[in-house]
């Protein structure tokens, strides 16, 4: 189980593909069953021919775009959806051309297909359906490439349900159902399923921009061609095989063969979907190929091999379900096909490994000849007069193919994992560390004495010498979800990059904080700027929250000032700490399960006019040595039992309101030990904020939030969240409040100034375009307020004034808010 937890991305996305096949097959059966009972046979025949044309031409029309996206999307930092929309547009256009070609061929040379086309509106609908089908196939594979397989499952499930529901509506109408009517339900289901998916993606903030840019395809032509060659070389021979059976034997033999072939296709679905997901997962992290292939093979063997043996042993009863003639003709054929399961495994994994390793052209050429060999084997075996001989010859060719491709797969499986030079070992991230991957925090303190970049590097080097596996002196491999531990020379170079010397000139603490905020997430768990007596440190969320960060900051600065090695105990790493904490708080009490499993969520905000927007993170900071005591006195008189942090939060909301920046008072995000959205009765009422927080902490749902965040990181990694391109034309601040409590542990740093004048910034590195994040801490009786926002959204002077009001007289703000 521990091994599988590290491969939940493979399990979840492959499982969603298998579930998609199961759902679409089940509902497809019900759809055609209902169609056969509500529409004339001629209409069903025309509709099935149209759907077959949509599937065939739509698949060819993809032109390798789907698999190209699976390969390239994990490598892109931005413009992912622009590339997806471009590929969908190209695939739709190519499929439209193919659809028009199909119509021309049908009208000129194939009278049977011409009759199946129906009237002009039905023909237009068919072309539209072909284009739309190709686009949805590309979209589904793009979602797999983004490791969002459950979303393509959702779309296909909605498609299956909606087309069936539409067919039910049509069946109830007092009309004769035609082939065009059936086709309309199919195409309408696709359109509606895309609408549902689009709404879901936008609600989750996944889509940044859908504007097609053909320029994004430059440099991808050869790869797309190779993907298309490989796709067609594997798809067309299997699609053509029933035609060969019909040609050399009979239509009756093909009916039995096709049934057995479809039963076997259910088995082949397992390695096929696992291999496709393997390609998606390993494309973004080739270093993980070996472990992913091993787990994928294990899944395919454990799930599919016993099933193939059961099918082989029960071939005759299975085929008897379709009729006695089917059992007599194809029971032995099904047994032979079921025993080719291992060949299917090696074939699919060979394709996935070849795609990841960039050997598309070679795999494509091999697949072309392999497909031709299978067709020739079928022709030769069928010409000897028996379906069993035909299948036996095809199976023999498939086994030979497996023998030829197995070494490519096995070389990956048994290859010894090698670390790059300078790395000596690795440690996988715990669930709690994975949960922190998307986050970072910046701490800036000063002015200090005796601290320099050279001394900080020496302190880190000393810590590394004592414990090279400590997280502070390890490299954070985000894609691999592990810590990489280095030898001494490698770490010395690593530390030089981690600590930047800004010189001895007077420093601007705010500018140092904003510089770290502007840097993208990287592989340094600890990133430091120092100069002018100040130290700014950005720490990855995987390292820890405010407590461990304060300990690290304190020890590094004290060690640097004393010119000694940093001395820190190894951080505890309990892999089950989150599940155990959740269980202790509410899991052991069934009466609390409902509350604990229902974390608060931000409401869906109505659409509003927007304007173009670009990020512009900024920080405004102030402190006060007098306000903390005045706050407590006011609290004891007017709001006894309420926390001082609730009073500060309420006073900041009141300050924004007074300055004309009316905050969104439907709720706010509060961060104590996890993020949660709460909706107090009023954001300017400390008692309401305190009551909402107390209720949330009692319910235990914040543990659920942390567990879900850790599970999501385990499944999908920690991809960078794309910045939106728009913000509301008249934004209302959405507030996030962070209470970091006491920072008195930093009181013994080598400060060069009195407590009332010290700087103590503490902010996260991300906030939404309309968000304002307020972080509070107290050190030596001095209240420190740091506010993070986007200067491209709000006037920095107005935000600075709000911070000043809070640090000057928050009680006056409270009294004004009450009036």
Image: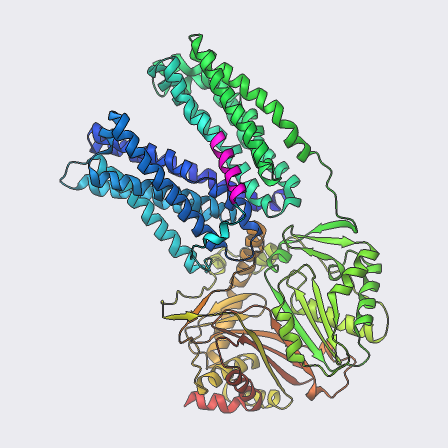
| Percent x, y of residue 76 | 56, 53
Residue 350 shows in this picture: no
| Percent x, y of residue 322 | 35, 20
Q: Quadrant of residue 243?
A: top left
Residue 815 shows in this picture: yes
Q: Main secondary structure of the magenta part?
A: helix
Towards the viewer: 453 or 9:
453
- The residue sitting at the left extreme is 174
Number of marks present in the image shown:
0
| Percent x, y of residue 233 | 49, 30
Q: Which region is colored magenta?
A: 221-233
- The residue sitting at the top extreme is 384
The color scheme shown is rainbow
Instruction: State the quadrant of the N terminus.
Output: top right
| Percent x, y of residue 568 | 79, 65
Query: Is residue 230 found inside the magenta-colored segment of the image?
Result: yes
């Amino acid at each position: 189980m521990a091994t599988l937890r590290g491969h939940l991305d493979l399990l979840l996305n492959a499982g969603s593909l298998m579930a998609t096949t199961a759902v679409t097959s089940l509902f497809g059966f019900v759809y055609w069953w209902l169609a056969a009972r509500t529409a004339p046979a001629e209409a069903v025949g025309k509709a099935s021919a149209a759907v077959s044309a949509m599937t065939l031409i739509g698949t060819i029309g993809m032109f390798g775009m789907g698999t190209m996206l699976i390969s390239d999307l994990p490598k892109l930092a931005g413009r992912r959806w622009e590339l997806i929309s471009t590929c969908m547009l190209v695939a739709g256009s190519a499929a439209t051309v193919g659809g028009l070609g199909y119509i021309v061929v049908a009208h000129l040379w194939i009278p049977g297909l011409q009759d199946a086309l129906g009237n002009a509106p039905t023909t237009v609908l068919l072309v539209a359906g072909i284009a739309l089908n190709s686009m949805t196939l590309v979209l589904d594979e793009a979602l797999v490439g983004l490791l969002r397989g459950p979303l393509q499952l959702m779309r296909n499930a909605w498609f299956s349900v909606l087309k069936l529901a539409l067919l039910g509506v049509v069946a109830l109408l007092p009309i004769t159902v035609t082939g065009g009517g059936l086709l309309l339900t199919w195409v309408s289901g696709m359109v509606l399923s895309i609408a549902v998916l689009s709404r879901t993606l936008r609600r989750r903030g996944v889509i940044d921009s859908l504007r097609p840019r053909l320029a994004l395809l430059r440099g991808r032509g050869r790869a797309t061609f190779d993907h298309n060659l490989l796709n067609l070389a594997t798809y067309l021979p299997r699609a053509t095989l029933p035609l060969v059976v019909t040609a050399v034997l009979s239509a009756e033999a093909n009916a039995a063969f096709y049934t057995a072939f479809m039963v076997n296709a259910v088995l082949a679905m397992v390695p096929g979907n696992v291999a496709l997901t393997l390609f998606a997962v390993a494309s973004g992290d080739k270093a993980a190929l070996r472990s992913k292939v091993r787990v994928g093979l294990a899944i395919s063997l454990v799930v599919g091999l016993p099933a193939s043996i059961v099918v082989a042993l029960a071939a005759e009863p299975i085929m008897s379900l379709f009729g006695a003639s089917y059992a007599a003709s194809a029971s032995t054929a099904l047994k032979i096909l079921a025993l080719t399961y291992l060949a299917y495994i090696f074939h699919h994994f060979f394709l996935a490994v070849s795609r990841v390793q960039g050997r598309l052209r070679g795999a494509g050429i091999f697949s072309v000849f392999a497909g031709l060999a299978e067709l020739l084997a079928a022709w030769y075996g069928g010409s000897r007069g028996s379906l069993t001989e035909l299948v036996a010859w095809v199976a023999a060719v498939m086994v030979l193919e497996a023998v030829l491709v197995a070494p490519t797969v096995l070389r990956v499986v048994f290859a010894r994992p090698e670390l790059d030079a300078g790395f000596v070992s690795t440690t996988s991230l715990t669930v709690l560390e994975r949960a922190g991957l998307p986050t970072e925090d910046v701490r800036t303190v000063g002015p200090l004495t005796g601290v320099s970049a050279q001394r900080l590097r020496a302190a880190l080097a000393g810590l590394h010498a004592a414990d090279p596996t400590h997280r502070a002196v390890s490299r954070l491999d985000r894609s691999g979800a592990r810590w990489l531990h280095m030898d001494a020379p490698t770490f010395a170079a690593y530390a030089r990059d981690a600590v930047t010397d800004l010189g001895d000139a007077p420093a601007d603490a705010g500018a140092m904080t904003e510089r770290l905020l502007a840097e993208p997430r990287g592989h340094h768990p600890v990133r430091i700027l120092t100069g002018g007596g100040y130290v700014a440190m950005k720490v990855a969320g995987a390292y820890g929250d405010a407590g461990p960060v304060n300990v690290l900051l304190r020890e590094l600065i004290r060690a640097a000032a004393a010119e000694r090695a940093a001395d820190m105990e190894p951080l505890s790493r309990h892999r089950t700490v989150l599940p155990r904490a959740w269980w202790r708080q509410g899991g052991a009490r069934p009466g609390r399960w409902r509350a604990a499993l229902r974390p608060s969520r931000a409401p869906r905000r109505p659409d509003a006019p927007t304007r173009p927007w670009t990020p512009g993170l900024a920080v405004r900071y102030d402190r006060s040595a007098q306000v903390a005591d005045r706050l407590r006195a006011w609290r004891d008189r007017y709001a006894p039992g309420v926390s001082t942090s609730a009073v500060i939060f309420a006073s900041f909301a009141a300050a924004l309101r007074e300055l004309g920046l009316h905050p969104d008072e439907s709720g706010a995000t509060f961060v104590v030990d996890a993020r949660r959205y709460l909706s107090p009765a009023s954001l300017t009422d400390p008692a309401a904020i305190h009551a909402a927080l107390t209720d949330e902490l009692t319910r235990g749902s914040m543990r659920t939030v942390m567990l879900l965040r850790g599970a999501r990181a385990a499944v999908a990694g920690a991809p960078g969240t794309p910045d939106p391109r728009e913000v509301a034309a008249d934004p209302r601040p959405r507030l996030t409040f962070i209470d970091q409590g006491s920072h008195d542990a930093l009181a013994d740093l080598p400060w060069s100034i009195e407590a009332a004048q010290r700087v103590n910034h503490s902010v996260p590195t991300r906030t939404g375009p309309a968000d304002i994040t307020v972080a509070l801490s107290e050190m030596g009786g001095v209240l420190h307020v740091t506010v993070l926002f986007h200067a491209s959204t709000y006037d920095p002077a107005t935000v600075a004034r709000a911070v000043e009001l809070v640090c000057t007289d928050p009680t006056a703000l409270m009294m004004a808010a009450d009036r």
